[in-house]
Image (cartoon, rainbow, N blue to C red):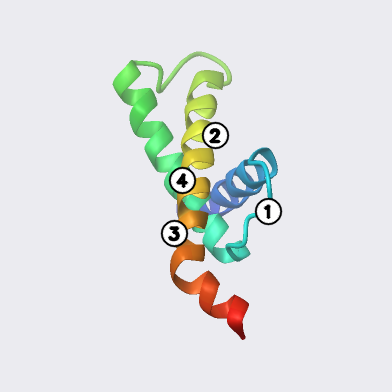
Amino acid sequence: MGWLWAIIVGFVLGLIAKAILPGKQHSPLWLTTIFGMLGAIVGNAIARAAGVDETSGIDWSRHAFQLVAAIIIVGVGDMAYMATLGKRKQRI
């Protein structure tokens, strides 16, 4: 059940990050989900390092770290996607 939850959270984080980033992102939905999952993992690590990984109630600060990490990873990942596979698909 943990993997299913990670996929759902990654999907939601990836979509929110895509919506926040300006312009059009060309990476496919499955790759956006993976970027969102990576953002959640990195955000959790940063929250743990900052000492706010577990608080009473909703962990808003941890979610903020996850979202910021997902935005950065989706932006960088989309640029890398366009630099490698995206240009090949545009020519076809």
Disc 3 versus disc 2: nearer the observer? 3
Q: Name the kind of residue labelled 1 in the image.
A: Lys
Q: Name the kind of residue labelled 2 in the image.
A: Leu
Disc 3 versus disc 4: nearer the observer? 3
Residues under labels 3 and 4: Cα distance? Answer: 10 Å
Residue at which label 1 appears: 24
x and y, in percent, of residue 57 in the image:
57, 16
Query: Which tag, 3 or 1, sits closer to the chain's start?
Result: 1
With respect to residue 83, does 39 lie above or below? Answer: above
Residues under labels 1 and 2: Cα distance? Answer: 18 Å
Q: Are marks 4 and 2 in contact (CB under 8 Å)?
A: no
Q: Residue at x 61, y 42 (%)?
A: 17
Residue at which label 3 appears: 80
Which residue is more in the foreground, 55 or 1?
55
Which residue is more in the foreground, 82 or 20?
82
Which residue is more in the foreground, 87 or 41?
87
Which residue is most to the left? 49
Query: Which tag, 4 or 2, sits closer to the chain's start?
Result: 2
x and y, in percent, of residue 21 in the image:
63, 41
Residue 67, label in figure: 2
Question: Can the viewer see residue 88 in this picture?
Answer: yes
Disc 4 versus disc 2: nearer the observer? 4
